[in-house]
Amino acid sequence: MDKPATSIDTIAKTCIAGRVRILNRVVTNIYDDALRPLGLKISQGNILIVTGKMGVATPVQVCEYLQLDVSTLSRNVELMRKNGWLEEVPGEDARSRPFRLTSAGKRLIEKAMPAWEKAQEEARKLLGDEFVSLLNHAAKRVRDSNRT
Amino acid sequence: MDKPATSIDTIAKTCIAGRVRILNRVVTNIYDDALRPLGLKISQGNILIVTGKMGVATPVQVCEYLQLDVSTLSRNVELMRKNGWLEEVPGEDARSRPFRLTSAGKRLIEKAMPAWEKAQEEARKLLGDEFVSLLNHAAKRVRDSNRT
DNA sequence: CGACAATTATTGTACATACAAGTATCGGCA
DNA sequence: TGCCGATACTTGTATGTACAATAATTGTCG
């Protein structure tokens, strides 16, 4: 004779958002701790990486890839520009503000590599290989799904 | 003859934090959109749920469960107290500030249930059953691991 | 060509988040 | 009993995040 589960019980036992958010906090902290000596946070690091892959990047492109609001990116890029890691590039469309890595930005990534690897290994061990593998697929699906 | 992968390529292809953070943003937005008509965000919703499960909760307990910094919780609880969803309870240890759901808080959870279910279903479809199942295990492991 | 919708970014506002530093209290031990 | 380290929380500061409103530009269609 099980009692009927309350709303509280149901949500506590199954809420996907709760779990994703816990993981996000823990994993973000692992990387931020590792990168702290470099004055870099993983939030900015990921923007640097995406920018590096793109060569010249526009806010809209980066936001689509990272599923970030443009207003969020606007302020993040501003900080990284001040740090000398990104620079604006003139573009054809005057509405857009394309940017790219500076050489300091590229050097920073190289310098951060060992710390990133350490964090990556810690996260991998914590989450398990199977989860990490599914994570890749899930992230790809999410990026392609384009809610809105 | 593959060229050696650069640091940028390696991180772009494999970074766990990048993927977890993308998922976090997308999933959080799904729930926040669904809950917006109620004036509730999933960040606060999860705190309400954990509090509800505990009956009387202390900040330290909630933070350990949700892997939140106490300073973060401090401000979140303050807002929810102002909204009338949480109330302080006198405790024995004067250092601690235990709190619990008010009846308004309980009613809010009931009222939010349909929206939560809608978001939950959208997230489940987006991420896939297999991923969701592993997510539960991963979250439990993370909670038990107690980095520090 | 000119009005208007669509696109792109910035700014105001509110909340989430963590670290560092500070305050209050507790518990144990000399 | 009184000191002192440990514990629990708050506050200052910086960044991350999104939504709404605004500004600037572009594209389109009559």
Image (spheres, coloured by chain):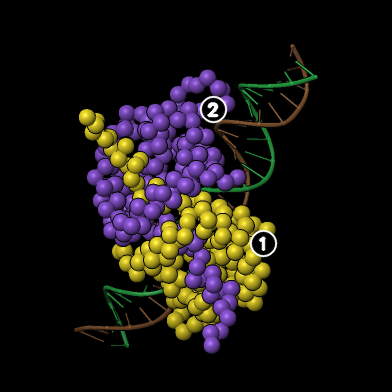
Chain colours: A yellow, B purple, C green, D brown
Q: Amino acid at mark 2?
A: Ser
Marks 2 and 1, how far apart at CA: 36 Å
Q: How many marks?
A: 2
Q: Is residue B61 left or right of residue A103?
A: left
At x 41% / y 31%, what residue is drawn?
B54
Circle 1 residue: A38
Q: Amino acid at mark 1?
A: Leu
Instruction: State the SS at label 2.
Output: loop
At x 47% / y 75%, what residue is drawn?
A58
Measuring from the top left, give residue B45's x and y in whole percent: 37, 42
The answer for which chain carries disc 2 is B
Circle 2 residue: B96
The answer for which chain carries disc 1 is A
* Residue A88 visible from this viewpoint: no
Measuring from the top left, give residue C20's x and y in whole percent: 67, 45
Measuring from the top left, give residue C19's x and y in whole percent: 63, 48
In which quadrant is the C terminus of chain A drawn? bottom left
Q: Which mark is residue A103?
A: none
Instruction: State the SS at label 1.
Output: helix
A146 vs B29: above or below: below
Q: Are marks 2 and 1 in contact (CB under 8 Å)?
A: no
| Nearest to the observer: residue B24 or residue A30 | A30
